[in-house]
Amino acid sequence: MKEIFESFNYQALLEVIEEQQGKTFMMENADLLYLWYCVQRKQVKENRELMIKYLRENRILENPADIVRTVNRYFKFRNLLPDLNYVQQQRLNRSNQYLNPVVPFQPIGNKMLGIIEQNKESYSVVDISEGKENIVAVLFKKGGISWRNNNLHPFEMKWVLEKNKKDLKKKIGVLE
């Protein structure tokens, strides 16, 4: 599933490259950019043999000559390719949380609520109905809820309680 969501980020990268450099440049270098993206996101290590194996096994390129040519071009232009910094990596990770929530976003009253994993200890109940992240509650994996929004309707609160009680407890292996 993570690979599917990473492909959304890669597609966005291609759109930016196309806007900046044109469609011809983007099409001629899509394979190189894909390999760079996979290395940056740590899907494959920056090692010639591992890269060839990755491209072949994942059927990204079919022709063995094209695979070797892409890897060679990667190393030829590696010094010109940027590195994603920590903040950029975190943004991509954060977007993956929203594309792959623990509990899918759904309309509950006037809010669009979903649950994402915040860290090793907790989940966040997030409202995205206003086009931005609004954390309405934090659900602790060891138990307990910290409400962050006092303006929730009772049935919105009920939804949070039900999801915490049923769905999340099953995911983390807590039995009542």
Image (cartoon, helix red, strand yellow):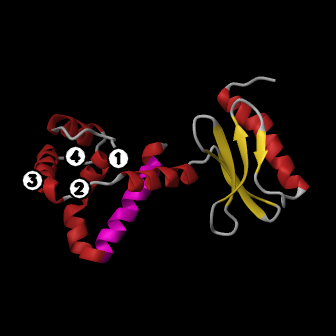
Q: What amino acid type should be assigned to the residue bearing mark 4?
A: Glu
Which quadrant of the view contains residue 25? bottom left
Q: Main secondary structure of the magenta part?
A: helix
Horizontal and vertical percent position of residue 121: 63, 35
First-in-chain label (4 vs 1) = 1
**Residue for point 15% across, 53% down:** 78
- In the image, residue 80 lies in the stretch drawn in magenta: no
Q: Which residue is mark 3?
A: 76
Query: Helix or strand or loop: what does disc 2 sit on?
Result: helix
Magenta span: 4-19
First-in-chain label (3 vs 4) = 4
Q: What amino acid type should be assigned to the residue bearing mark 2?
A: Asp
Query: Helix or strand or loop: what does disc 3 sit on?
Result: helix
Which mark, residue 4? none
* 113 sits to left or right of 84: right
First-in-chain label (3 vs 2) = 2
> Label 3: few (<14), some or many (≥20) within 10 Å?
few
First-in-chain label (3 vs 1) = 1
Q: Which residue is mark 2?
A: 31
Q: How many marks?
A: 4
Horizontal and vertical percent position of residue 56: 23, 40
**Residue for point 16% across, 46% down:** 67
Which is in the foreground here, disc 3 or disc 2?
3
Q: Which residue is mark 1?
A: 41
Query: Helix or strand or loop: what does disc 4 sit on?
Result: loop
Query: Helix or strand or loop: what does disc 1 sit on?
Result: loop
Q: What amino acid type should be assigned to the residue bearing mark 1?
A: Arg
- Cα distance between the residues tagged 3 and 4: 21 Å
* 101 sits to left or right of 148: left
Q: Nearer the viewer, residue 26 or 98?
A: 98
